[in-house]
Amino acid sequence: MKSPRIDMYRHISIQIGALKFFGIWFYIPYSKKNVWFWINILTRIVLGIAVFVIPTSAQLVYLIRLIVSGNAEIQEVAGIMNLVLTELLASLRLLDLRLRRDLLTKLSDELMSEEFQTEHKPQRKILEKAIVLSRRLFIVLLSLSGMDILVHVVLVPALKNFETLPLKMDFIFFDVNDEKYFDFICAYQILYKPMMLTTFVALQTLPWAAMSCAISQLDVLIYNFENMKEFVKATAAERNCGENEAFKEIFKRYVLHHRAILRFVSSIQAAFSGQLSSTLFISAGIVGTTGVQVFSIESPLKNFTEVIWVLAYFVTITCNLFIDCYFGNTVTGKSLHVATVVYSCPWIELPTHLKKNLVLFIAKTQVPLVITASKLVPVSLETFTKIALRTNDKRSNN
């Protein structure tokens, strides 16, 4: 009896479900002749302006006016810049993925490819574990970010009886501190944040989920080659054929699996290169400004709550950048390890034509799978280290 198929789409289903929940998914399930199509279009325009344009623009205007006034404190400027850059990052990533939506659809289809399925229990456990990791990363990041926003936007202002707005904004045409507008602006700032936050987390964890899937497939391929001898004997006994014939059949299946992994990693590169590059460059800026904000806080013991919030924000952004680089580095490392395990499989007594095929496959697997940010820099731990060192050097110089 065959084992049921593993639903690999679960790697990204929770992120896509979050985007659908807020009505900003990239596809509309209605024809242009249906009135609901135009209602969806109008809703997305309103949400896009209300959540991704107005708040960031208003904060940016406030920041510019603050700097021009000459009364700006480094701590306040850095804090506002962090929020502006974070919201700008979410908006740019959403726009980039919207433009690459067909590539995301292609990636989703490849998740369900037959080569990614397996019948054996150990390999299935590897795949299921990766799915759990993909979903857990989304939940954990959403929870941590939600707590951070809850404290900064709701609890801290509430302790001060909402005497000031949670976020610094300037709407140019009216005074946000005017009693006529204050309550509405305060409610607006609290209400738009959940959608912005969820969008940011969904877009942040989508590449993680895809890379987690690629890593699990490489782990399965490595496991298969490490246990090649046992699989050859089992296949030979099952099909009542020679071990050379069994090796040929199994090896062909593994080559097809490897080709599917190559295609999938190529799709990750195509769909998420813009996402990864924006994360690398903007997050590096956020890490730098957050560091400045931490060191510019006067009397840290008296402002302990603010110090904790800034440090939590700093750790979250740094961890996001690290996980991007860690997953990219792991994909590269696992892909290179395939050549080693292929060489270790029982090939010495194989016929010459099978040995030639094996040598060609080893040569192919010696080319590393490197995920890059817009083909500029590799997404790796080495890149993370360089960003951390350069950011630290700039902060020290300042």
Image: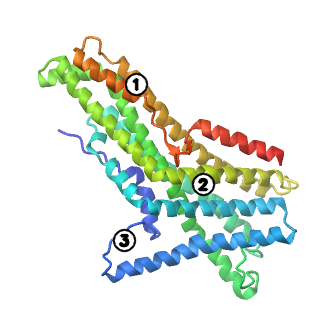
Residue 15 visible in the current orientation? yes
What distance separates the C-alpha of mark 1 from that of mark 3? 44 Å
Furthest residue toward bottom? 180
Is residue 125 depicted above or below 150 in this figure? above
**Dot 3 corresponds to which residue?**
28
Residue 40 position by quadrant: bottom left
Q: Earlier in the sequence, mark 1 or mark 2?
A: 2
What distance separates the C-alpha of mark 3 from that of mark 2? 31 Å
Amino acid of disc 1? Ala
Left or right: where 72 falls relative to 352: right
Q: Residues within 10 Å of mark 1 (few under 14, many from 20)?
A: many
Residue depicted at 39% across the width and 34% down the height = 218
Is residue 145 depicted above or below 348 in this figure? below
What distance separates the C-alpha of mark 1 from that of mark 2? 39 Å
Residue depicted at 19% across the width and 23% down the height = 246
Towards the viewer: 375 or 339 = 375
Amino acid of disc 3? Ile
**Dot 2 corresponds to which residue?**
144
Q: Earlier in the sequence, mark 1 or mark 3?
A: 3
Q: Which quadrant is the N terminus positioned in?
A: top left
Can you give x and y, in whole percent of width and height, for residue 140 in the image? 54, 51
**Dot 1 corresponds to which residue?**
339
Furthest residue toward top? 349
Foreground disc of the pair 1, 2: 1
Can you give x and y, in whole percent of width and height, for residue 169 in the image? 71, 74
